[in-house]
């Protein structure tokens, strides 16, 4: 009885201590040489952000609370937490994503996703849209990061990709009977099966839906831009998602598939590597987002890790893709930042450099990963540095509006008011 009573008192003490610790947590004052107002695109100096209770309490107040913990980052720029709108956290950079499904287990995918989530966070990405995994690993990761089990960004998951039989996101190349899948795993043909596939992803936690409108690079279909879903099939997915308050991202390389997806009402075109004037005009009229990967279009991109068939498609597509994104930037199409990563070398920052090479200003490139990404997600609690918003804050050395290369060197990361990286 004494031992049980002792443990009961210890438990009460630990609980009370935890409550006191939470209640007495000090505000944090983050100081730096400057901060970027992403709405105006102007840096302001100096910078002091006060964080309290996981939210930004004030920006450059007359005085900080007397009990604040002060962090001085020196010659750095404070930015909102960055957002990657197309990532696959369960994948291994440079690996064969199709054969992984045959050789690995869901436990492996979950562990890799946790590792990659932490890497993404330490690179400054406090929010990501995971555009396709298997076994609902992305949904589990969303819960794990929200609950604090895993260090990682806020995750917006899609569950399984929705694809036609033998389409880009189906697991093709195996003998009949091996890894055959149905609507629950995202393989669906015709409006009724697509409705079922969408409903099943939502049932198990998807916050977005991804449909594969065309062929792709990292699959065994021969034509990278071939349309693989009809406009009617795409519309069935969009309308079903809309009934549940969700939106659709469409993997689309080829022009006809892009046009069909836009007309069907998707929220974003992923990749969009074969745009033409008609597609750009329609995207602007409908407010459709482009979520490209400019680093892929860069000359000198290392494609050596790809299988020969995929490398051939990538090499063919690269100059077309460069022209497409340059046209879209010049025309003012809404663009959100993405890497389609994790990237080899754990280097998502190079996408900022590539966007500038394609025609964006440094400020526009940063906006694509902050306020523009928040607009795509339809979230109002992040994406800028303002009182009341989530304390998702990063810092880079120097001034990224003058030298975009510093976006590769994030030196401070805070998410929900918790510091994950500091000098």
Image (cartoon, rainbow, N blue to C red):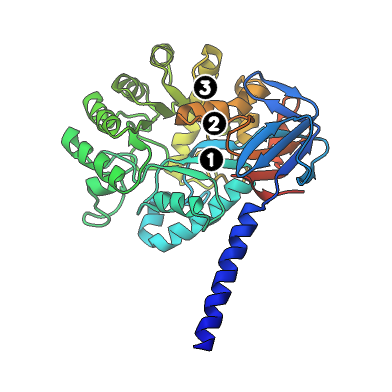
In the foreground, 289 or 20:
20
Residue at image coords 67%, 20%? 41
Identify the secondary structure beneath mark 3.
helix
Residue at image coords 32%, 22%? 265
In the foreground, 267 or 79:
79
Say which mark, if any, is on residue 325: 3
Residue at image coords 57%, 31%? 383
Identify the secondary structure beneath mark 2.
loop
Q: CA distance from mark 2 to mark 1?
A: 11 Å
Is the Cβ of the residue at disc 3 closer than 8 Å to that at disc 2?
no
In the foreground, 12 or 423:
12
Mark 1 residue crowding within 10 angstroms, few (<14) / some (14–19) / many (20+) = many
Q: CA distance from mark 3 to mark 2?
A: 12 Å
Percent across and percent down for residue 275 are 43, 20
Q: Which residue is mark 1?
A: 127
Which of discs 1 and 3 lies nearer the camera? The answer is 1
Q: Which residue is mark 2?
A: 337
């Amino acid at each position: 009885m004494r031992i049980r009573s002792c443990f009961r008192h210890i438990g009460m003490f630990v609980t009370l201590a935890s409550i006191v610790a939470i209640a007495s947590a000090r505000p944090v004052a983050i100081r730096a040489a400057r901060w970027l107002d992403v709405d105006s695109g102007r840096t302001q100096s100096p910078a002091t952000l006060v964080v309290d209770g996981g939210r930004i309490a004030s920006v450059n107040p007359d005085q900080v609370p007397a009990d604040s913990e002060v962090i001085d980052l020196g010659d750095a720029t404070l930015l909102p937490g960055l957002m990657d709108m197309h990532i696959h956290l369960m994948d291994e950079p440079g690996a064969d994503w199709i054969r992984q499904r045959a050789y690995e287990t869901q436990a492996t995918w979950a562990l890799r996703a946790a590792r990659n989530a932490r890497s993404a966070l330490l690179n400054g990405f406090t929010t990501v849209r995971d555009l396709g995994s298997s076994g609902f690993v992305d949904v589990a990761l969303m819960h794990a990061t929200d609950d604090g089990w895993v260090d990682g960004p806020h995750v917006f998951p899609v569950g399984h990709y929705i694809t036609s039989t033998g389409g880009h996101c189906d697991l093709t190349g195996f003998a009949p009977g091996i890894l055959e899948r149905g609507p629950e795993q995202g393989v669906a043909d015709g409006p009724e099966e697509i409705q079922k596939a969408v409903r099943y992803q939502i049932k198990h936690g998807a916050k977005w839906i991804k449909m594969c409108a065309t062929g792709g690079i990292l699959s065994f279909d021969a034509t990278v831009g071939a349309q693989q879903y009809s406009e009617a099939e795409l519309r069935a997915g969009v309308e079903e998602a809309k009934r549940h308050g969700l939106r659709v991202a469409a993997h689309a390389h080829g022009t006809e598939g892009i046009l069909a997806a836009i007309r069907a009402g998707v929220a974003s075109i992923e990749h969009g590597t074969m745009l033409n004037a008609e597609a750009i005009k329609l995207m602007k009229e409908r407010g459709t987002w482009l979520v490209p990967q400019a680093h892929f279009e860069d000359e000198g991109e290392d494609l050596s890790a790809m299988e020969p068939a995929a490398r051939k498609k990538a090499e063919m597509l690269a100059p077309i893709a460069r022209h497409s994104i340059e046209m879209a930037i010049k025309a003012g199409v809404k663009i959100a930042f993405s890497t389609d990563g994790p990237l080899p070398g754990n280097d998502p920052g190079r996408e900022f450099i590539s966007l500038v090479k394609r025609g964006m200003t440094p400020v526009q490139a940063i906006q694509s990963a902050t306020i523009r990404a928040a607009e795509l997600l339809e979230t109002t609690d992040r994406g800028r540095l303002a009182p009341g918003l989530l304390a998702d804050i990063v810092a880079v050395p120097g001034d990224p509006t003058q030298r975009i290369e510093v976006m590769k060197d994030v030196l401070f990361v805070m998410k929900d008011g918790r510091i994950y990286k500091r000098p």
